[in-house]
Image: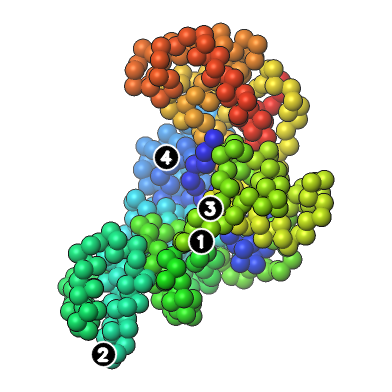
Amino acid sequence: MNFIPSFSPSPLSYVAALRGIKPHTPGSAFAYAVVNCRVPDMLIAMAASNPEGRFYGLMADAVLCGASGEQARTRQVGNVSFICATPAQALALVSSKPDTLPPLDYVCCDESEAPLVSAERTAFYDFATKTLRPGGLLATNYRPSPTADGVLKFLVREFAPEMNAEQACSFLLELKKLGKFFFKENAVLAAKLDQAIVRNMPDDFFGLFDDGSAGSSTFDTMVGLIPRGFTFVGDSSISASYIEMSVPPEAQPIIVECRSNQLYEPIKDFAQNRSIRGDIWCKEPAVRTADLSELFGGFSFGITVPREKVPSEIEVQGKTIALSTPFYEKLIDLMTLMPVGIGDILAHPSTENFVPQDVVDAVQVIIACGIGRPMRGLYRATNINSISQPRLVGSFNKYLDKASLTGHEMPLASPVLGDAMTLSPRDALVMQALVRAGLANSVAALLPELQRLALNPAQAARVMDAEPTEEIARQMIEDAVSESIVQWYAYGLLEAA
């Protein structure tokens, strides 16, 4: 199973908790809106995964909006609505009719592939300011610059004019350290930088950026949100919030020294050389606390890959993070079995001597490394050992029973993850067979579906590399039952009939 990237409520709240902001209480009602909604099916799955939430998708395309609403009705997901409105129209709507939307806890917008024009982005910021509760979170994806060298050009134009000759030469050396990732992909500029350093002629390099406009979308976002009462919380890509995990070792001291500089985030953009940036902002005033139980006690933490696929160590920016110590191994054992909260970990017999602070710290490392993820974690599977006749959980997932699968991944709603989860093509076919016929007759249910897929070689190639036989069907089922079925129950995709 894999995660479908999204602005899921639990990870957003977790990032806020890392900054000491008291998170939304899992299981309590909340309201969530996506502006510039471009993937409505994922919003529907997210709504199905968070039944206590109320979800709104705002989109400019009237045809897509209508189709999305119909899809939600077909999948019987009643806590999501779609509104045909641009950001400016949405702002006008809530200004004239405040009861159009409830006070929101989350407002999200993905501009990574379809950027808003300036006026619409301003309207988006005003919409978020008007609709978010105090302590509510704004999440947005966007490109730090429209061009590959845009951030570098912005930094050169901001810093170079104020420097004397000695400072300019030092700045070239800092750019070389900061731009390790960037210059690796831009050999021509790297050569020109080296030449300017050798000759002590910084203006030769700076002059390359005299022409054309220069700007930083990151800085523009800061200018747009800070005066509106927002505080930057962190990055939705959790590892990017950790300097030691996201920038070259030689650049880390420079980044730390720049922490109080108003251009800190654009400088970090250059060092990270990312094409897409994910921001999380908090509307003030927010409730802050240092109490670990208040910050992290409401989350569950899980690892969805099989235990044997969890690495024993992670290489990050020249450093090795060992995950093979007895302490980490016990945590990972628990988190791969099923999602667990901090309290669950501390109460388990194998971890009875663990210290809460140590557990929180270690879980944060596992999450930052991308191995695990914070989750909603309120669903508790029953009869997890009775797998002979499973059934799908929730109306959204019951679509799988009737679907004619085509060898693509299948998103299902997980009330534990609080978001959509994807099944591989093989796992989707196996789960469908188990639900339709039970474990005892699953081979007979799976084989006709494999034979149907075999009529389309492109589809069949995603699932099998030979003509379908009973033995192939049996092996697929045995593999899934041994590797995945416990997690299907643990994540609330299946329950015992």
Q: Is residue 48 above or below residue 149?
A: above
Q: Is residue 283 visible?
A: yes
Q: Which of marks 3 and 2 is nearer the N terminus?
A: 2
Q: Mark 1 points at which residue?
A: 319
Q: Residue 342 carries which label?
A: none
- Image-based side of 148 in relation to 217, left or right: left
**Pointer 2: residues within 10 angstroms few (<14), some, or many (20+)?**
few
How far from the left and from the top, in percent, is residue 265? 43, 70
How far from the left and from the top, in percent, is residue 109? 44, 54
Q: Quadrant of residue 38?
A: top left
Mark 1–mark 3 Cα distance, whole angstroms, equals 8 Å
Q: Residue 65 carries which label?
A: 4
Q: Name the residue under label 3.
A: 314
Q: In this view, does 399 lie above or below 163?
A: above
Q: What element does badge 3 sit on?
A: strand
In the picture, the quarter occupied by the N terminus is top right
Q: Earlier in the sequence, mark 2 or mark 1?
A: 2
- Mark 2 in CB contact with mark 1 (< 8 angstroms): no
Mark 4–mark 3 Cα distance, whole angstroms, equals 43 Å
How far from the left and from the top, in percent, is residue 431? 57, 22
Q: Earlier in the sequence, mark 4 or mark 3?
A: 4
- Mark 4 in CB contact with mark 2 (< 8 angstroms): no
Report the residue at 44% width, 11% height from top: 468
- Mark 1 in CB contact with mark 3 (< 8 angstroms): no
**Amino acid type of the residue tagged 2 in the rendering:** Ala
In the picture, the quarter occupied by the C terminus is top right
Q: Mark 2 points at which residue?
A: 165
Mark 3 or 2, closer to the camera:
3
